[in-house]
Image: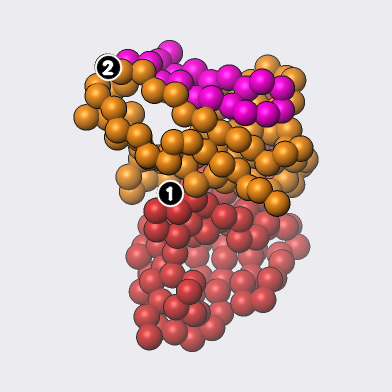
Chain colours: A orange, B red
Amino acid sequence: GAGVSQSPSNKVTEKGKDVELRCDPISGHTALYWYRQRLGQGLEFLIYFQGNSAPDKSGLPSDRFSAERTGESVSTLTIQRTQQEDSAVYLCASSLGGVQETQYFGPGTRLLVL
Amino acid sequence: RKEVEQDPGPFNVPEGATVAFNCTYSNSASQSFFWYRQDCRKEPKLLMSVYSSGNEDGRFTAQLNRASQYISLLIRDSKLSDSATYLCVVKTYQAGTALIFGKGTTLSVSS
């Protein structure tokens, strides 16, 4: 079956512009996560959606970052007024939401802010 | 103290070698443990979950020591295709926290 998909795969933008990244989770997965991975660094948790519960936004680095998810489907991560330090790979993952659930990652969006 | 710590390596080993990676975590309330593998410029993929009694999957063996807050991964008979970064991952069920990733240990297997 189809895995997690993300779009665009690459995005180059100018400092100060807004960007929107999209994630399509695996069908039926109630949990969805956004992570950021800077070059040569580990994954950094950003935000987590579980079903209809309020999202866990504890990892968002600033109020320029926001994310939405409609039901158990598509999620969008928006970065407003992008800065050069926002350059990273943004990874989305989804899971069934159980205790030992496996997270399946999408291929990521590579964002470069000039 | 970082939540999940790993030796970044790189570990450079010949084919057929046995190699072990270690990982420590700081939150004693952590409840689930995993090893993920990440190839260069690719997304992480689950290698194996880590259970309290230890578990094995082919050439890979994972161990968990809750008292010491320590996780290990042993790879026997290394293959060229094992070259990747291995990520130690911990989950703590507090306020819906997602997975906490270590920065990874890089393994390079050569012929």
Q: Where does label 2 land, which residue?
A: A16
Residue A52 visible (yes or no): yes
Q: Mark 1, mark 2: which one is toward the viewer? A: 2
The numbered dot on residue B103 is 1
The numbered dot on residue B76 is none
Which of B73 and B82 lies nearest the eye of the viewer? Answer: B82
Which of A87 and A17 lies nearest the eye of the viewer? Answer: A17
Image quarter (top left, top right, bottom left or bottom right) of the C terminus of chain B: bottom left
Mark 2 is surrounded, within 10 Å at the Cα level, by few (under 14), some (14 to 19) or many (20 or more) other residues, namely some
Q: Quadrant of residue B52?
A: bottom right
Residue at 36% over, 74% down: B12
Looking at the image, is B102 positioned above or below residue A74? Answer: below
Which of A41 and A32 lies nearest the eye of the viewer? Answer: A32
Specify the segment rendered in magenta.
A63-81
Q: SS of the residue at dot 2?
A: loop
Tell me residue A3's x, y (percent). Answer: 63, 47
Task: Indicate left or right for B85 with B54 as reference.
Answer: left
1 and 2 marks on the same chain: no
- The amino acid marked with disc number 1 is Lys
Looking at the image, is A107 positioned above or below residue A73? Answer: below
Tell me residue B85's x, y (percent). Answer: 44, 60
- Of all chains, the one bearing label 1 is B
Indicate yes or no whether the magenta region holds residue B44: no
Residue at 71% over, 64% down: B54
